[in-house]
């Protein structure tokens, strides 16, 4: 005997939960909005699976995040040298920082981030029904968000990420549950959009469109029987937008998803600006040598001291090994002649080689970085921090050297 909507909502675990039902192309989508760290969200997922019969379960996860939930130990096998060589150190560090907020909540309330998604995945496996991963790859989302904002807004974004590491305010569990109320979410996100519409578009709106397209795509490929029912478990912040797209979207779902899954091309102006600065400085050094050999030698010395010195200070701030500091000092001045791995990458690889991360460092990484001191005590985190600070120091040194050398000529 089928369970009616009234019967389902009478379940205490579902009382007050944000649930929408969307009918599209012969498919009924039962969309549950959740808070990613919430006991009641887990209970709501379990209650829906227990009370209704579904042909598939869809979750707000990409393949990499789903794999991380299926095999949480896989992170310990990360090849740190490979991450640095491939230029992914910044992305890994950003992902770790983003996880600290949910980790603090998990420690506070004794529930793992994404536990409701894990419950949905386990429920699909237990019932032997298809599991659909409908979210965009997290790396693509972060890159699109980064490229969507201007140069100065990126500093604000980095500041917000860093602030999340140092924030220690206890968050009331009642406030987490309030996040599921549609009116509060609508108000919060409209304020967010007014502050940074491009960021809102990349982090929220694009994913609403993407997930709606993925649901339609999976429904067309995986289900042939009519009618059918799909349980969709997504964050409450996506509930209203995704359901609206699911109702009105008319474009080809595969094409829409493919367009939104593309990684934006890197902006070329920072590269050309850096090249222009270096060429200007080297031209100034050449002019200095033309005027006077001693003046040219002084300009060349200033280039080495400023770029190498600030890079070494970055490594020192990361409490790197003396050999890593030396590597930063040597690598920074010759950066223009060495395309490929940045000076921060060379220093970080030396750090990882001299202070090779232990198994315990990988095991404790997510716990250690919740506290700001953990970025200096955990060898994996310290290597990533060394990479970032040395790169930052090198850039500062290049500009400082350029200004100093040009002033010495006039």
Image (spheres, rainbow, N blue to C red):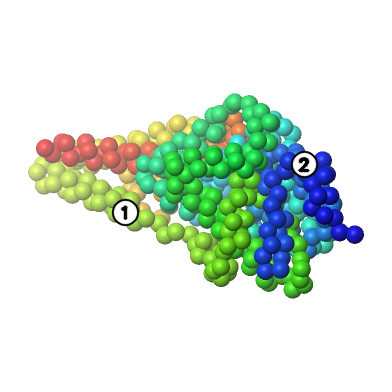
**Residue at the image position 58 percent from the left and 52 percent from the top:** 241
The residue under the point 53% across, 61% down is 261
Q: Residue 71 in the image: x percent, y percent?
A: 72, 51
Work out whether mark 1 precedes mark 2 in sequence or the reverse, and give the earlier one.
2
Q: How many marks?
A: 2
Q: Residue at x 56, y 29 (%)?
A: 167
Q: Residue at x 54, y 29 (%)?
A: 166
Residue 407 in percent (x, y) is at: 16, 36
Q: Quadrant of residue 291?
A: top left
Q: Nearer the viewer, residue 122 or 199?
A: 199
> Whole-Å distance between the Cαs marked 1 and 2?
53 Å
Residue where numbered disc 1 is placed: 269
Please tell me how crowded label 1 is: few (under 14), some (14-19), or many (20+) other residues with Cα within 10 Å. few
| Element at label 2 | loop
- Relative to 14, is 292 on the left or the right? left
Point out which mark residue 92 bears: none
Q: Quadrant of the N terminus?
A: bottom right
Q: Is residue 8 above or below residue 28?
A: above
Residue 153 visible in this rendered orientation of the protein? yes
User: What residue does disc 2 label?
Assistant: 15
């Amino acid at each position: 005997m089928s369970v009616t909507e009234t019967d389902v909502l009478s379940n205490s675990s579902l009382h007050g939960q944000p649930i929408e039902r969307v009918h599209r192309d012969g498919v009924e989508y039962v969309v549950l909005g959740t808070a990613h760290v919430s006991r009641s969200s887990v209970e709501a997922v379990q209650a829906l699976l227990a009370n209704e019969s579904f042909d598939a379960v869809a979750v707000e996860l990409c393949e990499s995040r789903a794999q991380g939930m299926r095999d949480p130990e896989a992170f310990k096998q990360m090849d740190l040298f490979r991450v640095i060589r491939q230029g992914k150190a910044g992305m890994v560090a950003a992902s770790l920082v983003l996880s600290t907020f949910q980790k603090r909540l998990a420690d506070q309330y004794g529930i793992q981030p994404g536990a409701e998604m894990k419950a949905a995945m386990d429920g699909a496996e237990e019932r032997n029904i298809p599991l659909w991963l409908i979210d965009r790859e997290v790396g693509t989302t972060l890159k699109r968000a980064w490229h969507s904002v201007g140069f100065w807004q990126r500093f604000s974004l980095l500041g917000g990420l860093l602030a999340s590491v140092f924030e220690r305010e206890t968050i009331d569990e009642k406030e987490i549950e309030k996040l599921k109320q549609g009116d509060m979410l609508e108000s919060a996100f409209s304020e967010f959009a007014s502050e940074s519409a491009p960021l809102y578009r990349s982090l929220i709106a694009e994913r609403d469109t993407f997930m709606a397209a993925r649901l339609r795509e999976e429904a067309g490929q995986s289900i042939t029987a009519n009618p059918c029912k799909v349980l969709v478990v997504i964050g409450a912040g996506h509930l209203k937008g995704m359901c609206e797209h699911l109702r009105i979207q008319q474009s080809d779902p595969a094409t829409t998803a493919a367009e939104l899954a593309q990684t934006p091309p890197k902006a070329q102006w920072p590269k050309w600006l850096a090249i222009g600065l270096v060429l200007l400085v080297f031209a100034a050094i050449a002019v200095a040598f033309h005027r006077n050999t001693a003046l040219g030698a002084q300009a060349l010395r200033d280039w080495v001291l400023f770029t190498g010195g600030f890079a070494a200070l970055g490594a020192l701030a990361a409490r790197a090994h003396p050999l890593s500091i030396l590597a930063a000092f040597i690598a920074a001045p010759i950066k223009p002649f060495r395309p490929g791995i940045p000076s921060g990458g060379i220093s970080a690889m030396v750090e990882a080689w001299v202070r090779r991360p232990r198994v315990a460092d990988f095991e404790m990484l997510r716990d250690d970085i919740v506290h700001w001191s953990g970025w200096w005590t955990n060898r994996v985190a310290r290597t990533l921090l060394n990479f970032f600070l040395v790169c930052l120091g090198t850039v500062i040194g290049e500009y400082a050297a350029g200004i100093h050398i040009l002033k010495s000529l006039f």
